[in-house]
Image (spheres, rainbow, N blue to C red):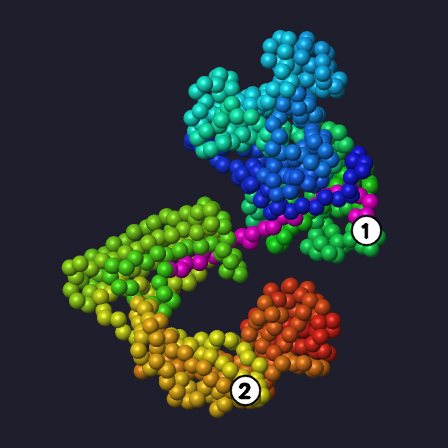
Amino acid sequence: MLEAAGLRNRWTFSASALLLAGSLLFGSVPPAGGVDGVVDHRAGQSACVAAAAESAGFEDMVGNFAEEAANCLAHYGITYGKTPERFSPRDIIPRWQMALFLQRAAVPAGIVLPGPADQGYTDLGSFASHIQAGINQMAASGIMPGTTDTTYRPSEPVTRKEMALLLARFLAAAATGPGGTDIDTVRPDDSNFKDLSQVSFTANQAIRRLYEMGVTQGTTATTFSPEGWVTRGQMAVFITRMLAHTNARPVGVSAQVTEDLVFRDSPVEIAISLRDTRHQPLVNRSVDLFTTDHPTMVFSDKGTCTAEARPAVGARECVIDGTDPATDMSGNLRAGVGGEDAERLRVWMWTGNRDEVFNEDTTQYATIDIATLASPTALMVTDSLPSSAVKVPFGEAVTFTFQLVDNDGLPVPREGVRFVLEVQESRTSGTQLERTTLTKTTGPDGSARQTFLHVDPFAEPGDVAFLDLDVRTSGGLAVRDGTAVGIVDDDGSRDDATLEWSDDRAEPTTLELAVVREYIVASSAGSGAAATVHATLSDQYGGPVRGEQVVFSSNDSRGVPNGVRRTTNSRGVAGLNYQRDSAESFAERITGSFDRIRDTTRQYWVMRVSGAADGSGTVRVVDTDDDTTILVTNDERVLLIEYDSNDAFKIGPSPVSYSDFEDDLTVGDTLRYAITNQRSATVNSFTLGNR
């Protein structure tokens, strides 16, 4: 077991929360070789995680910019606050306090200080013996010497310039920790602070090096204010950023992810640290890591691991054995886990004696939840045209977006994926023909863009410009066409769809029908239930056509009155409100027409299943937001089926969870139901059959 008496048995923290905290306090790690204003050597890990992130109880720090830093320093024993309840972040730091802070910070940072021998300062007599000892130790170490050979000026405020010198000397004396940078290797290439001309070369280098390491910042974008005094709140932030570059880590077991973006099927590297109650490294200690697909089922009532647990690293889960990785001489290790197709990966980490068995109730452990992104399976192509457009007027640009997506069509922010565009452009006014091959690369959001424009200043009337666009990917990445005219569909023929620029006069070409509510409970009460259907009339460029009459009809004698007309408004929309006075369910088919242009849609008038019932039907509407699905049965009844997390679900013969059922529920499925009551406490049964 870890020597961490008095601590809670477990710390739980998520990778996403850790990364958010890192972005606020430390920022993301930029590429090396920065330019002015770019921090090149920010720490890749934090000293303020796990137990060091817990509240220290300082009432005056709630919501303060330095709240997390003050809590962190309290965990390491670097500060005790002005009182147990107050940190006093606005108070100025005198030199004697700064000496004590650095003396205490030296312990977790691994700096061995010399003994507290008297250094000959004559102005320390009024201070307590432990303060004098701390001052003498810091002076003897060379980190914080006196102002002269015989004076220390303990009550003099610490300036920002002096703080930079102290932190630079501290980092030079400390061993570099995981994710940190050796300050002696930092070559500052930034000169954004314009008020350093009066400071010494040594102070100038210290300020700029610490800026490159993400430890210090300016008071503005261009000023450092070297003679400004340091407050306790500022001091706390400076020291915690500095400790991130050292081997300082919290008491017990702590873990951090080293990647800020994790894709499924790719291993994740977890940085693990073990420390005793004095924050000293625990060396050559085996660490067991295990994971599960079902976190709520991984432990028995007695706290032992169930069959749902499996090893994340090593051969056996929930036991310390010879296959587990061990900490190095600094008390740290890195373990690669994952490579599984899971939306979320939870990993448990703990240490103990050989053959010791994990128990949730008695073992000290840490967990880390890693939110993952699905790997891209396709490149979705969309354009900036209205969905109803079939042509583009000359002079209008069209932008195509190429977005990486997963199997569910959700965006995947993977950078650096290359693909090729094969572009062919031609015109009817001549033999002009251009063939171009463009190589594109996705950006940080997993997308790339390309814009095309055709103008027609001298063309003959009726001239048309054509664009044919084919997309070539590699690595098994499919291409999905979400463009208005299906331009990237390529069946290998010469008749691939093309996008046309035209000077034709706008004319109605498209009619689209949509109901406001896809399903409505049928009713004969009063004048019945109300419904609304909209018809949108557009021209070939996707623009609205106003002032034209759309004719509506229905296959339901109690639904839309046949032959009723409505006129399109400035948005090209003709709306029809109507009442249906019937409690009978029906799948109403509504038709709208203008000249030879027509479209249809469905309005489902449903019957709510409110008592005991069983049967089956075909899924026609999926509404997971309201835990509802609409079924059409073999006898053409339209049923509203409600479910909740208390119910029992199957896909075929296999029981599944509520969330898995919702994920798989799709229009066209066959759903069998056995309902005893719709009350939320009742367990009803639902089984998805083959599609």
Residue count near mark 2 (Cα–Cα under 10 Å), binned few <14, some 14–19, many ≥20? some
Element under label 2? loop
**Residue located beneath label 1 in the image:** 303
Residue count near mark 1 (Cα–Cα under 10 Å), binned few <14, some 14–19, many ≥20? some
- The residues tagged by marks 2 and 1 sit, at their Cα atoms, a distance apart of 58 Å
Left or right of 42 on screen, residue 641: right
| Residue 272 in view | no
Q: Amino acid at mark 1?
A: Gly
Say which quadrant the N terminus sits in: top right
Q: Relative to 592, is 486 above or below?
A: above
Quadrant in the picture for residue 332 = top right
x 70%, y 32%: residue: 81
First in sequence: mark 2 or mark 1? 1
Magenta-span inclusion, residue 375: yes
- What residue range appears in magenta? 360-383
**Residue located beneath label 2 in the image:** 528
Element under label 1? loop
Magenta-span inclusion, residue 261: no
Q: Position of residue 133 (x, y in %)?
A: 73, 17
